Image (tube, grey):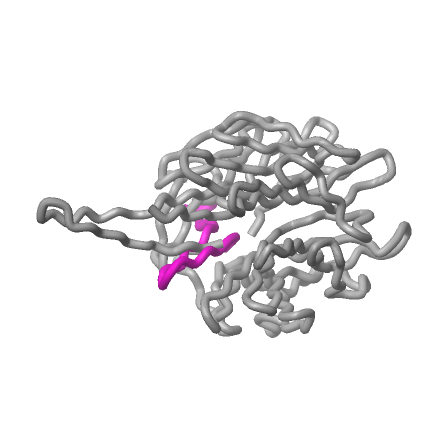
Amino acid sequence: MLKFYTYLVLGAAGLFTFSCNLQDHVIPTTPDVYVAGYQYGENNNTARYWRNGQAVDLMSNNNGIVATSIAASGADVHVVGWDGDSTLTAHARYWKNGALQSLSGQYAPSVLSKVLLSGGDVYVAGSGADAGGYYALYWKNGVPVSLNNSFSGWARDMAIANGDVYVTGTASNGVGANTVAKYWKNGVDVDLTNGTEQTFPSGIAVSGTDVHVVGTTGGKYRTVAKYWKNGVETVLSPSSYHSNAEDVAVAGNDVYIVGNVGDSLNYYTANIWKNGIATPLPGGVAATGITIIGNDIYVSGAGLNGVTSIAKYWKNGAPIELSDGTKNATTTSIFVAAP
C-alpha cells in the first residue's frame, strides 16, 4: 500500500470584473476565490478550504490529513486529498459540498491529488492500490480509468484540452523498473525522465499543441526545479542549492511557473517564474498553485509568522492571509470561479 506522509505541497486565477447598468447604478461583481489546504500540528490536523477568506473544515485526523485540490461549479464545491491512519497508510478522500464521496475500481483509492471540472464531468486524479502495489489512474464521474504503464504510479495533475485528457505523474515502465516522470495523453505515455534520478512532476498545462509540465528532481541533499515543454527539459534556478516547481499556467505566449528556492540551511522563498525569470513573492516561503484569468494572477502558498506557518495567497503579487498564526496552516491549490 502507498504510505502516507504529511508534507508541504507546494495555481493562480485572475479577477474578472463585470458591471452592468441597472437603474443608473453600476453594480460590480467579483469572483469567488477558493483555496484548499490544511491545518497541522501534534494531534491537531484538519483538512479545510477557504471561500473568499472564510474557512470551511472538512475532516480532522490525529495522524495527518491533506486537502490537495479544489474546484467549484455553481453551488457545488469539490475537494480531494487524503488522510493517514496509525500505520501511516494513506486513504483517499473526496468531498462534495463537505460530504465524503466514494470512488470505485479494481484498485482501492489511496491518494487523490487533483479534481478537475470539464463541462458536466468531474475528473479526479491520484493513485489506487492492491496487494501488489499502487497505480496511476483517474476517475471520470466516479468510474476509474487506468493509465498505461502505471505500475508504482501516482497521477499528480490533469488538464483537458480539445477533448483530450492529459495527466502527469510517475510510474515505472514495468515490474521492477525504476519510476520515471511522465505524462499521458488519452492514456498513451510520454517519458520525461529515464529513472536514474527520482523526479516528481506536479503540474501540467496545455496550450495549443504545446504540453507544459513542471516538477522536481532530487531528494535529501539537493532538489532541482524543472520544466518540460513538449518533453524538452529546462532547469529553473540552476545555481540554487534547492528549488522545486509546483504548478504551471499559460497565458498567451507567457508561461508562469510557481515554486520555491532554498539555501543550504533549507530556508525557502516562494517564487513565480515568468518565461524563466524568477520573482519572489513577498512574505512567501511556499508557492503551491497558480491559475490565471484575464490579466490577474492568483498563487496559493504559505508565509511565516515567527515560526508558525500562515496560509495565504497572492493576487498579482499582493499577499492575502487566510490564517491568524495561532496554529500552523498552509494551502495547496487555488480555484477562482468567475461571476
Q: Nearer the viewer, residue 222 or 134?
A: 134
Q: How many marks?
A: 0
- In what quadrant of the picture does the N terminus appear? top right
Asked if residue 95 shows in the view, the reply is yes
Q: List the single residue furthest toward the left.
A: 24
Q: List the single residue furthest toward the right.
A: 176
Residue 3 on image: x %, y %: 74, 38
Figure check: 310 above or below 283: above
The quarter holding residue 178 reads bottom right
Q: Which residues are magenta?
A: 285-307
Residue 28 on image: x %, y %: 22, 48
Residue at the spot 46% in from the left edge and 51% down from the top edge: 300
The quarter holding residue 259 reads bottom right
Residue at the spot 79% in from the left edge and 41% down from the top edge: 134
Residue 42 on image: x %, y %: 57, 31
Residue at the spot 57% in from the left edge and 43% down from the top edge: 115
Looking at the image, residue 128 sits to the left or right of residue 300; the answer is right
Q: Main secondary structure of the magenta part?
A: strand
Residue at the spot 62% in from the left edge and 63% down from the top edge: 213
Figure check: 238 above or below 113: below
Magenta span includes 295? yes
Looking at the image, residue 195 sits to the left or right of residue 226; the answer is right
Magenta span includes 101? no
Residue 294 on image: x %, y %: 37, 61
Q: Nearer the viewer, residue 266 or 215?
A: 215
Asked if residue 241 shows in the view, the reply is no
